[in-house]
Amino acid sequence: MFMPVLDYFPRRSCRDWGLVFLLLIYVTSSAHAQTPVDSKQSDVTIVLSEQVGSYAEFNNALDTLLSGKNIPHRVIDSTMPVPSSGLVIGVGMKAASAVAASEASFVLNVFITKASHNKLLRDFPRRAGSNAFSAIYLDQPVHRQVRLIAAIFPDKRNVGLLYSTPPTELARIRQELNEQGLTLHEQAVDPKRNLSDTLQDILGSSEVLFAVPDAAVYNDSTIRNILLATYRSGVPLVGFSPGYVKAGALCAVFSTPSQIAAQTAALIRQFGDSHVLPASQYPHEFEVMVNEQVARSLGLKVKSASLLHDEIGREDKYY
């Protein structure tokens, strides 16, 4: 169960509900995007799944950071040969898959979820257990998401969760919610049953619906009906991307392409000193977005995004 990166940062074609975010991002430079391969390998090779939208924002931010530190690097797309030497950065699932299949010795993938990274380890067993195959996940750690729910809904106790298959982090979700005094109402979607019926069941026992990146439940063909159902039931939806908030979810915690680029640059510098990659990790920096219009429509008085960010950040931890 994994979700492509562009379900977080939508496409220009508006096929996914994360699209609004990407429409605000333009490609300002493509000078590095098609650098020809020569016999002299760069220390760092960045492999892009695409050269638009959030990928371009990430690439431009990373280029600025690396150039400022005089770190040699080049950028190629996922159809070009991947070098075996140096550090290779796979950006997005398409690039990450190509890099995993290559002979690259040291790999850092970004813009992929934890579930996607685990899928790569299953699909390419020789990468499993390697300390030379790491990632910065796109999704947020469970504690950060749960802290957002607790902070924005101090008087609510019942949290609904829908999934097609149990999330790998389900036990942690239960634990974190319990530590915040919240009760989880979970339900698997039966493929033989109408999604709207299952949704009504979970909304009947929940005060908040906690969306997780499960493409079988949350996708471009279902999200409109899910948002309408939650609105009519008076149950706010906590999303997992800025695009979902703009589409009608109440709030979300997420990391921007520039924040992920800064973390990537730090790991590249660390690798340059030690030639060792750290374990896969979640984003260190994050943002909170709140749809104030949705809050008013639901009759909710909520804290501002900046206050919520500060409240979550006071107890934040990376893992």
Image (spheres, rainbow, N blue to C red):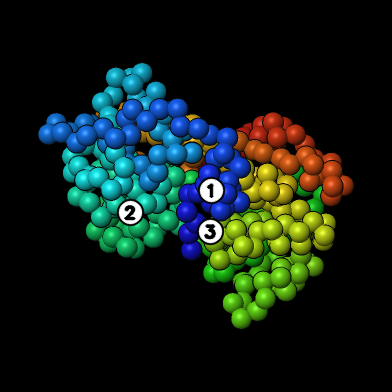
Q: Residue at x 33, y 21 (%)?
A: 67
Q: Position of residue 58 (x, y in %)?
A: 44, 34
User: Which structural element holds mark 1?
Assistant: loop
The residue carrying mark 2 is: 97
Residue at the limit of the structure toward the bottom, as seen here: 192
Type of the residue with mark 1? Ser
Q: Residue at x 40, y 51 (%)?
A: 93
Q: Residue at x 65, y 59 (%)?
A: 223
| Separation of residues labelled 1 and 2 (CA atoms) | 23 Å
Question: Is residue 150 in view from this perspective?
Answer: no
Q: Residue at x 49, y 39 (%)?
A: 53
Type of the residue with mark 2? Ser
Left/right placement of residue 43 relative to residue 308 reads left
Q: Nearer the viewer, residue 203 or 293?
A: 293
The residue carrying mark 1 is: 13
Sequence-wise first label, 1 or 2: 1
Which label sits in the foreground, 1 or 3?
1
Which label sits in the foreground, 2 or 3?
2
Crowd band around label 1 with a 10 angstrom C-alpha radius: few (<14), some (14–19), many (20+): few
Question: Is residue 256 in view from this perspective?
Answer: yes
Q: Position of residue 188 (x, y in %)?
A: 62, 71
Sequence-wise first label, 2 or 3: 2
Sequence-wise first label, 1 or 3: 1
User: Which structural element holds mark 3?
Assistant: loop
Q: Position of residue 284 (x, y in %)?
A: 50, 36
Crowd band around label 2 with a 10 angstrom C-alpha radius: few (<14), some (14–19), many (20+): many
Residue at the limit of the structure toward the front, as seen here: 13
User: Which structural element holds mark 2?
Assistant: helix
Q: Which mark is residue 169?
A: 3
